[in-house]
Image (tube, rainbow, N blue to C red):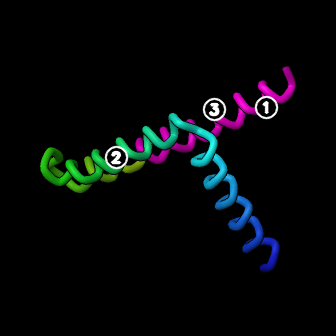
Amino acid sequence: MKKFLKSFLYAANGIIKAFESGVNIRVQFSLAIVVMYLSPIVLSSFNEFLSVLLIIGLVISLEIVNTSIEQLCDFVC
């Protein structure tokens, strides 16, 4: 159980580091907040809202992967 909780701590630290080092992720997160705020006005069903929420999560997670690959390439090259 201790390892399981430690893995969440490592994941949280990685997300915090991505927000500290990546400008793009902060912009995308800010736009995601705007979309979440406007979604009840624009979207007509709960399923559409869940779809938008899923896409926002995918975009932010892929941006974190992209940022980590860029930092790895900068370190190697």
* Residue at x 66% of width, y 50% of height: 17
Label 3: element kind: helix
The residue under label 3 is which amino acid type? Asn
The amino acid at mark 2 is Ser
Q: Name which residue lies at 59% across and 38% down.
A: 22
Disc 2 versus disc 3: distance between alpha carbons?
22 Å
Q: How many other residues sit within 10 Å of disc 1, few (<14), some (14-19) or many (≥20)?
A: few
Range of magenta residues: 55-77
Which residue does the numbered mark 2 point to in the structure image? 51
Image marks 2 and 3: residues in contact by CB distance under 8 Å? no
> Looking at the rendered structure, which numbered label has been put on residue 27?
none
Magenta span main SS: helix
The residue labelled by disc 1 is: 72
The location of residue 74, given as percent across then percent down, is: 78, 26
SS for dot 1: helix
Q: Residue beneath label 3, please?
A: 66
> Is 26 in front, or is 47?
26
Q: Nearer the viewer, mark 2 or mark 3?
A: 3
Front residue of 32 and 1: 32
**Residue extending farthest bottom:** 1
Q: Is residue 68 magenta?
A: yes
Q: Quadrant of residue 9?
A: bottom right
Instruction: Please name the amino acid that badge 1 sits on.
Output: Leu
